[in-house]
């Protein structure tokens, strides 16, 4: 269970649920297939997959959850084509068609096609780190993470979450690292970055297979552009792309980590899941505090926007 992306949230009120207690709370909103006339269904699924019924899975003080979303794929081009055919028939009959009639026809066609539409399933994994009081979501888009959080709050109405951010602009920090030709201890620029002009959002330069500290990139930065996305390697253990909103994408665990998972043993599917989950969450438990410290710490919004909080190690 290797996460490819990280969107990290702090739990503001103490998260003290056991895996069993959390399972019972999630059980009221299980995942299910779409009905014939349903566009979409969302619910909790067993993290271990088909053949298991537990909606939580705990290992090394972390509890994994899985949101399953099933959606009917109904091409809008097909809907429009059938609506147009019906409109043409009505016009040939001499009937005047209002905007309201068009909307009704679209709803009618959609309902007619839905039972035959292909249903696509998608699973979003996340886990609670009870030691650090974090929720780590494997999602590259905020919209997908918010979808997870909305369902979570239906199951846990009292939970309070806040996206982890840092006090200083990440773009300015990365830009300063690039100009100085060095990053924080343990972090190394890789061969990819994107620059933008803060005054012109659409003015973007992508630098692929090129050192971020190169003279060409530096000239762009000295001219006023900033690094708002860059690829890094952390302690030769994982590679990742960091964005200006503290989203972490395209995570790649090095062979060193992969080999550790194999050494733990994989006698069963559950054993392999546990081995990967423990290693993945353990790496993040060391990596995230190091990254936050490198970026000058967590922004504390509850007490003061300028006060830093201690980052657990």
Image (tube, rainbow, N blue to C red):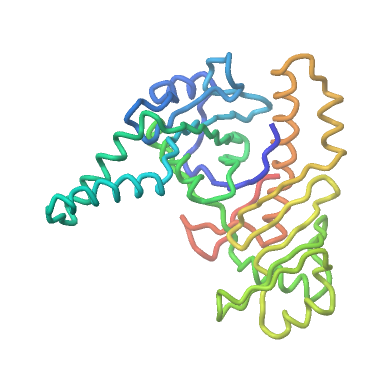
Q: Is residue 49 above or below residue 222?
A: above
Which residue is found at the position 40% from the left and 30% from the top? 116
Q: Is residue 257 left or right of residue 161?
A: right
Which residue is found at the position 81% from the left and 79% from the top? 216
Q: Is residue 48 above or below residue 251?
A: above
Give x and y (percent) for residue 19: 54, 22
**Front-lying residue, 203 or 61:** 203
Residue placed furthest toward the front: 92
Which residue is found at the position 79% from the left and 14% from the top? 267
Q: Is residue 272 left or right of residue 84?
A: right
**Front-lying residue, 147 or 98:** 98
Residue placed furthest toward the bottom: 223
Q: Quadrant of the rendered structure where residue 157 is? A: top left
Give x and y (percent) for residue 60: 68, 27
- Quarter containing the C terminus: top right
Give x and y (percent) for residue 275: 75, 25
Which residue is found at the position 87% from the left and 25% from the top? 263
Q: Quadrant of the rendered structure where residue 230 is? A: bottom right
Q: Is residue 180 above or below residue 9?
A: below
- Quarter containing the N terminus: top right
Q: Is residue 270 left or right of residue 138?
A: right
């Amino acid at each position: 269970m290797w996460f490819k992306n990280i969107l990290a949230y702090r739990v503001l009120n103490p998260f003290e649920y056991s895996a069993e207690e959390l399972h019972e709370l999630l059980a009221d909103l299980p995942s299910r297939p779409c009905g014939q006339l349903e566009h979409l269904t969302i619910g909790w699924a067993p993290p271990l997959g088909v053949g298991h019924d537990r909606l939580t899975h705990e290992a090394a003080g972390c509890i994994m959850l899985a949101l399953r979303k099933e959606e009917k794929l109904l091409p809008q081009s097909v809907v429009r084509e059938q609506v147009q055919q019906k409109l043409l028939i009505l016009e040939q009959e001499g009937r005047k068609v209002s905007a309201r009639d068009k909307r009704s026809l679209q709803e009618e066609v959609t309902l007619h096609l839905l039972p035959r539409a292909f249903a696509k399933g998608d699973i979003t994994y996340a886990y609670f780190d009870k030691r650090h009081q974090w929720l780590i979501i494997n999602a590259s888009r905020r919209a997908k993470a918010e979808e997870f959080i909305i369902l979570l709050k239906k199951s846990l109405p009292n939970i309070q979450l806040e996206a982890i951010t840092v006090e200083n602009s990440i773009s300015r920090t990365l830009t300063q690292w690039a100009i100085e030709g060095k990053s924080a201890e343990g972090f190394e620029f890789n061969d990819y970055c994107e620059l933008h002009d803060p005054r012109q959002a659409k003015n973007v330069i992508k630098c692929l297979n090129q050192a971020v500290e190169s003279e060409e990139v530096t000239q762009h930065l000295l001219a006023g552009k900033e690094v708002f996305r860059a690829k890094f390697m952390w302690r030769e253990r994982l590679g990742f792309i960091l964005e200006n909103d503290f989203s972490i994408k395209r995570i790649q665990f090095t062979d060193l980590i992969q080999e550790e998972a194999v050494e733990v043993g994989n006698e069963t599917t559950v054993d392999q899941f546990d081995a990967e989950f423990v290693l993945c969450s353990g790496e993040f438990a060391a990596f995230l505090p190091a990254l936050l410290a490198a970026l000058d710490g967590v922004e504390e919004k509850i007490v003061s926007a300028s006060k830093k909080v201690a980052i657990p190690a």
